[in-house]
Amino acid sequence: MPKPKTRYVCSVCGSAQPKWQGKCPDCGEWNTLVETIIAEAPPGRVGSPSASPAGVGPLALPDIAADGYERIPVPIGELSRVLGGGIVPGSVVLISGDPGIGKSTLLLQLCAVLAEGGTDRAGAGRGPVLYVSGEESASQIKLRAARLGIASPNILVLAETHLESISAHIEKTQPRLVVVDSVQSIYSDAIQSAAGSVTQVRDCAAALLRLAKSQTFPLFLVGHVTKEGAIAGPRVLEHMVDTVLYLEGERFHSFRLLRSVKNRFGSTNEVGVFEMAERGLVEVKNPSEAFLAERLPNAAGSAIAVTMEGTRPILVEVQALTSATAFAQPRRTGNGVDFNRLLLVTAVLSKRARVRLSDQDVFVNVVGGLEVEEPAADLAIAAAIASSARNRPVAADLALIGEVGLSGELRSVGQLSRRINEAAKLGFTRVLVPKTVARKLERSPAGLEVLGARTVREAIEMALVPAAPGDEAG
């Protein structure tokens, strides 16, 4: 028996190499080349030139029909927000996240709400919802559905990993929605490599994508993640699909964030907020109120930042703690904030605002497990650190917005009016912003006072309440 021909395919960029190398010459990643058997495609295989339809040529832009793409409404408001207002028929959505974060739970809840009703664009009823499970048995899906209170007869569960069998069942049932959990578990007979390999993932996803486009049913694919948090498999997988969603959250926190990083039919960087409850994921319609529910208003080391997640302003509590260090080099620890931004803010406080931190360990935490990356939270981080170092609380009715520069100046941030309006809705009466933009605001919400500061030192003096005799620490 002749030895099969092999090549080495990079699991990151998908490039093929004739021999194994420690480092991929295309993307520069180490230990990513995987041996793959080269199999000749059988006659008439999908994707070969013989399978292309004859007589199809270029069309003039005005002659291309663009009707029939009304979105399918999704009763889950936070999911609908991330998708751009509903599900586009024929779209392919890739959702990924850490193991146990709630991807299968969210998709099963989506199947339940769509199975209860829904019609196609012609007004006629359309088939059931098909849930394809490649990693769990049908009994396990049934147990999860029972825990979530789902018992719709319009949800069909298929425990299958064979691509050709899955395609045949889709052709037979004509579903209104298909969920494949997960794409790394699917394999095809036409490819002589193990399920989850670069070639299998790429070709199986491409075959499912062509089927979804041709029959105009929405397809949701669940993707694994690597230990670095990126989607496992070839990067081309993210380019093929229409939408890429990440479900994020800390395992020991109840909040989950569904983040859109690619969306051909809506806004990118949109975020939906959920809370993991006993009956599954429950949408949080007012995230700011949820993140501030357990706040102690007059505690030193606490400040309120107004951050933007996509198009939504969210108020979060930033906590800081400073304590005398027992080592020659003080520690800087951040949870939920960028570590480099934390080092920048502490250096500016020491140099420009005369806050003594050279002998202090600094710990910063964003309450609720939220990751805050934008510079608009710099002023809140600086105020929280100074509040803890000087043992003076930040005013309870004050929200802080602004970026801190290396010279100690406060710089403006985008969408300031929306941030201020969100602070006013939650009962804050004052907001501290850079002085350059405070003068440009045409009007402030009723009852909200806009304060302006030019430097971080001036802002800290305005934010902290006056110290009682003997209370200030430094």
Image (tube, rainbow, N blue to C red):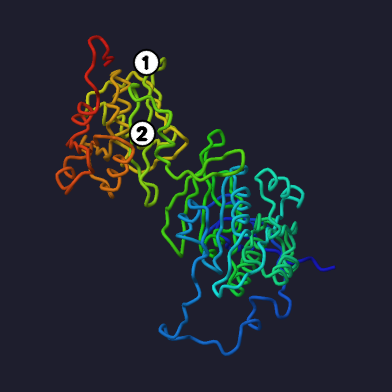
Q: Position of residue 254 (x, y in %)?
A: 53, 36
The residue carrying mark 1 is 324
User: Which quadrant holds residue 325?
Assistant: top left
Q: Which residue is mark 2?
A: 342
Q: What is the three-letter code of the residue carrying label 1?
A: Ala
Q: Residues within 10 Å of mark 2 (few under 14, many from 20)?
A: many
Q: Position of residue 50 (x, y in %)?
A: 66, 83
Please tell me which residue lies in front, 178 or 413.
178
Task: Look at the picture and state if 126 lies above or below 133.
Answer: below
In terms of depth relative to the viewer, which is nearer, 48 or 223? 223
- Mark 1 residue element: strand
Q: Residue furthest right?
A: 1
Name the residue furthest top.
Answer: 470
In the picture, the quarter occupied by the N terminus is: bottom right
Are the residues flagged by discs 2 and 1 in contact, CB closer than 8 Å? Answer: no
SS type, badge 2? helix
36 shown above or below 138: below
Horizontal arrangement in the rendering, residue 167 relative to residue 428 (left or right) = right
Q: Which residue occupies 72% across, 51% down?
A: 135
Q: Is residue 371 left or right of residue 103?
A: left
Q: Mark 2 or mark 1, which has the lower sequence index? A: 1
- Quadrant assignment, res 367: top left
Q: Name the kind of residue labelled 2 in the image.
A: Leu
Which of the numbered marks, if any, corresponds to residue 72?
Answer: none
Q: Which quadrant would the C terminus be assigned to in this image?
A: top left
> Is 409 located above or below residue 47 in the figure?
above
Left or right for 300, reference 130: left
Q: CA distance from mark 2 to mark 1?
A: 18 Å
Name the residue located 21 percent from the left edge and 34 percent from the top edge.
408
